[in-house]
Amino acid sequence: MTTHPSGLATLPNEHPDVPMRMEHTVPLPRCCPISHNPQPGSTLTVRYRTGERVLEVYSLKQFIQTFVGGHADGTRNMEAMVQQIGRAVAEALAVPVFLHAHLMLHPEQEMRITLTVKPSGETLPHERGRLRG
């Protein structure tokens, strides 16, 4: 197991030559000390195609707990939280990751956030044509 600066842990992929897609869905805790959002029933789904490493799922849940009451980097809103989690997972795995957050908010609202995050220095397939000129 390798622990990254974010606190996320990864495990070696024992068969990196076998294409595999991973999906982790975890409940989101109430993070905001004022609004108590997100409400129970909120989830975060992380999807990725495996490379040399796979995400250790319990460390994802522990990393999400660092956002309760406001993250150490000052993150206090749901959008920034999902972006920060995406960046950390992409960096830890060194592969692009897709995130979908389904947030139940008070009073009786829902918000869905979907994003794709690439690790530093990597270009996503839909961006490659733009870079050629």
Image: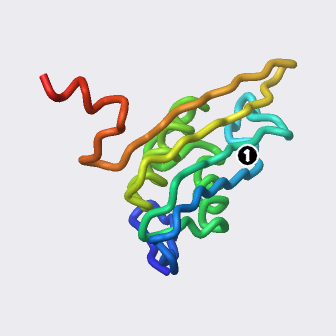
Residue beneath the point at 67% across and 45% down: 45
Residue 38 falls left or right of residue 22: right
Residue beneath the point at 78% across and 38% down: 42
Q: Which picture quadrant has residue 56?
A: bottom right
Number of marks in the image?
1
Q: Decide: is 66 above or below 133.
A: below
How busy is the neighbourhood of tag 1: few (under 14 within 10 Å), some, or many (20 plus)?
A: many
Q: Nearer the viewer, residue 42 or 94?
A: 94
* Rendering coords of residue 65 (x, y %): 65, 55
* Rendering coords of residue 52 (x, y %): 42, 70
Residue 17 falls left or right of residue 68: left
Extreme front residue here?
Answer: 18
Q: Nearer the viewer, residue 65 or 41?
A: 41
* Rendering coords of residue 53 (x, y %): 46, 70
Q: Secondary structure at mark 1?
A: loop
Residue 121 falls left or right of residue 17: left
Q: Quadrant of the C terminus?
A: top left
Extreme left residue here?
Answer: 133
Residue beneath the point at 45% across and 77% down: 2
Residue beneath the point at 42% across and 61% down: 92
Q: Decide: is 15 above or below 46.
A: below
* Rendering coords of residue 14 (x, y %): 51, 80
Q: Decide: is 10 above or below 74.
A: below
Give the image's coloring scheme. Answer: rainbow
Residue type, label 1? Leu
In the picture of the structure, the residue carrying the numbered disc 1 is 28
